[in-house]
Amino acid sequence: MKAFKEALSAIMKPVTIKYPAGKPEEKYSQIPDGLRGKPQFDDEKCIGCAACTVQCSTGANIFKDEEDHRLLEINLNKCVFCGRCVEICPEEALFFTNKFELASTVKDELKVNVRIELYKCENCGGIVAPKRQLNVIVERIMKNLTDETARKIAEEDIPKYMYLCKDCRRRLSYKLNTHTRKQVLLE
Ligand code: SF4
Ligand code: SF4
């Protein structure tokens, strides 16, 4: 009898909700918290480190160094919304929105991107790293150095080495006799 009542009420009263989900006056009001919708970069927070691209196993999240900028781009055609890039971001600059209707016939609408300014080598003009990333590195090194002598060394060395590309930095360290491999050979 109980089963019969349940079956009858299921026939009389719908147990599903109409699409788009939620109250008619509030479209999508029943989207659950934590839904992995369209990923989005936070333009203000992203430092261009590219850690998120390394984590992406489908090749959806890539970076490309252009003339003055690093382009970070997620191709929604390849994204499986696994969330690894979001988890790994050290700046919490990548997040999922609750937008889930992503079908489009316009290719560019299937791309999510951000451009971060690059720092060029003071010696040769080659690419060093994104400016914001360098600033964050310097800020964190100085914040964590409590020893006075170490702070002094860092204050001297950072302007000398930090703003050179890897090749110019290596050449300078050989010239100044501070390259680690050279030190090992000399010892
Ligand atoms: S989104 Fe995060 S991990 Fe990706 S480049 Fe920006 S700061 Fe780095
Ligand atoms: S959610 Fe997963 S598949 Fe999509 S860009 Fe991030 S790491 Fe790649």
Image (cartoon, rainbow, N blue to C red):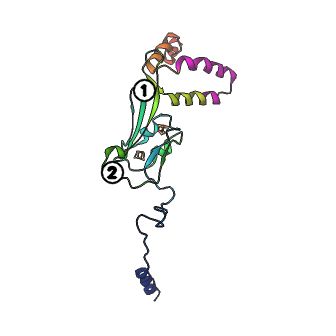
Label 2: few (<14), some (14–19) or many (≥20) C-alpha neighbours in 10 Å: few
Q: Whole-Å distance between the Cαs marked 1 and 2?
A: 30 Å
The residue labelled by disc 2 is 104
Q: Quadrant of the N terminus?
A: bottom left
Tag 2: amino acid: Ser
Which of the 4 image quarters holds residue 108? top left
Give the vertical position of 162 relative to 112 (above or below). Answer: above
Q: Quadrant of the C terminus?
A: top right
Q: Sequence order check: which comes first, mark 1 or mark 2? A: 1
Q: Which of these two is toward me, 130 or 152?
A: 130
The boundaries of the magenta stretch are 140-161
Percent of width and height locating residue 45: 53, 38
Percent of width and height locating residue 6: 45, 83
Residue 142 belongs to the span the image colors magenta: yes
Considering the numbered disc 2 on the image, is that residue within a helix, a strand or a loop?
A: loop
Cβ of mark 2 under 8 Å from ligand 2: the answer is no
What residue sits 42% from the left and 76% below the top?
Answer: 14
Percent of width and height locating residue 113: 41, 40
What residue sits 41% from the left and 50% below the top?
Answer: 81
Considering the numbered disc 1 on the image, is that residue within a helix, a strand or a loop?
A: loop
What residue sits 65% from the left and 19% below the top?
Answer: 152
Q: Which of these two is toward me, 66 or 23?
A: 23
Tag 1: amino acid: Asp
Badge number at residue 68: 1
